[in-house]
Image (cartoon, grey):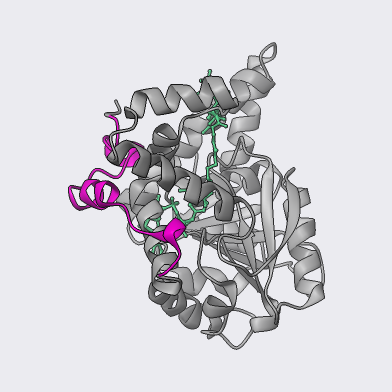
Amino acid sequence: MAFFTHQIVRSLSLSCVRGAAIKHVTVIGGGLMGSGIAQVAAATGHVVVLVDTCEDILKKSAKGIEGSLKRVVKKKFADKPEAGEEFVQKVLQNISTSTDAASVVKNTDLVVEAIVENLKVKRDLFSALDKVAPENTIFASNTSSLPIADIASSTGRVDRFGGLHFFNPVPMMKLVEVVQAPATSQETFDALLDFSRALGKHPVSCKDTPGFIVNRLLVPYLIEAVRLHERGHGSKEDIDVAMKLGAGYPMGPFELLDYVGLDTSKFIIDGWNEMDPENPLFAPSPLLNKLVSEGKWGKKTGEGFYKHK
Ligand code: CAA
Ligand code: NAD
């Protein structure tokens, strides 16, 4: 069986010691980002429990992780398929799944949250976990756009709370933005930088400002592309081709919006618009709103700006 039950992995992970390197990781949210974070953590020898709200979602997450690992292996072990298969099995053995976050975090060094981009939902989750996680457990959010300090203040551990912002697709993208909120201790921040390096990623240090570095630049660009299209100044296909061939981007803005998720993109822009309504860069887009209201959330639902198989 590829995925262990939570009980088995739990018994393997009781050795975490205060101050020691992060070994046991709980990833909450088994969607696009959580699955990728769990995969990369497991592939670098961490004991990982992936948590979501129901078994059906976790089955989908497990399938996605297996598929992604096979793509990684096809390249990394091109000449050694047997070693590749062994690697896949080893990684999968490092991951278990659970729908019971409260019991999983009792034995974890680090919680990485990758659930829906909604402040209240994230605060409710962390506030509940804070009551059951050991004192030394570090909490981190993968939020794209929300202030880390606003999420952390739902807990009594603001010093052991930081941002770990990964990029989609996590197995391919080398960057992690490590966010130090005003109350994040240096020890916590250093542990998150070390953890990012242990995953084979390149961390950059960020302040707790809207969108950190990448999204503060990327999201207004993406929404500006939608506005350009809304004004009738270019087809989405032409805009995508233009940015790929003229600016060297791997994906055009509409392809990337579909890849990120139109729901997530809307959550980001709406949150910033609420925070700074006069800023034209953060103005909502009627077309984006329409597609989201129609359930066209991009690749994850099969249709967004484009149709996906
Ligand atoms: N898992 C494992 N391997 C993968 C993968 C995945 N999910 N996706 C791609 N690969 C690897 C595979 O080896 C794949 O080869 P196969 O198709 O034979 O398996 C190889 O990459 C090439 O993939 P593709 O042919 O699909 O296309 P590509 O060369 O364009 O690479 C890409 C794919 C890396 C995603 C590239 O298109 C890219 O970099 N796109 C931009 C992504 C980006 O900007 N991400 C940031 C989004 S913003 C964000 O994440 C922050 C936020 O908060 C919203
Ligand atoms: P997603 O919709 O693919 O997945 C979210 C998952 O969280 C779902 O499976 C959902 O069932 C689960 N979930 C929701 N509430 C939960 C709860 N209380 N407990 C457990 N699981 C819960 O979303 P995603 O794209 O993976 O984004 C997750 C987070 O990562 C968001 O904060 C988003 O802003 C951020 N992020 C997204 C991207 C991206 O490109 N999509 C990139 C970087 C960061």
Magenta segment boundaries in residue numbering: 278-306
Judge by depth and name the residue closer to the eye, 243 or 135.
243
Q: Is residue 161 left or right of residue 239?
A: right
- The image shows residue 293 at horizontal and vertical percentages of 20, 53
Judge by depth and name the residue closer to the eye, 272 or 128.
272
Residue at 35 percent of width and 62 percent of height: 53
What is the number of callouts on the image? 0
* Quadrant assignment for ligand 1: top right
- The image shows residue 224 at horizontal and vertical percentages of 42, 45
Q: Is residue 86 above or below residue 56?
A: above
The reply to whether residue 52 is visible in this rendering is no
Residue at 54 percent of width and 47 percent of height: 218
- The image shows residue 91 at horizontal and vertical percentages of 62, 39
Say if the magenta span includes residue 283: yes
- The image shows residue 92 at horizontal and vertical percentages of 56, 40
Q: Residue furthest bottom?
A: 156
Residue at 55 percent of width and 53 percent of height: 215
Q: Quadrant of the C terminus?
A: top left
Judge by depth and name the residue closer to the eye, 280 or 127.
280
Say if the magenta span includes residue 142: no
Q: Is residue 251 above or below residue 139?
A: above
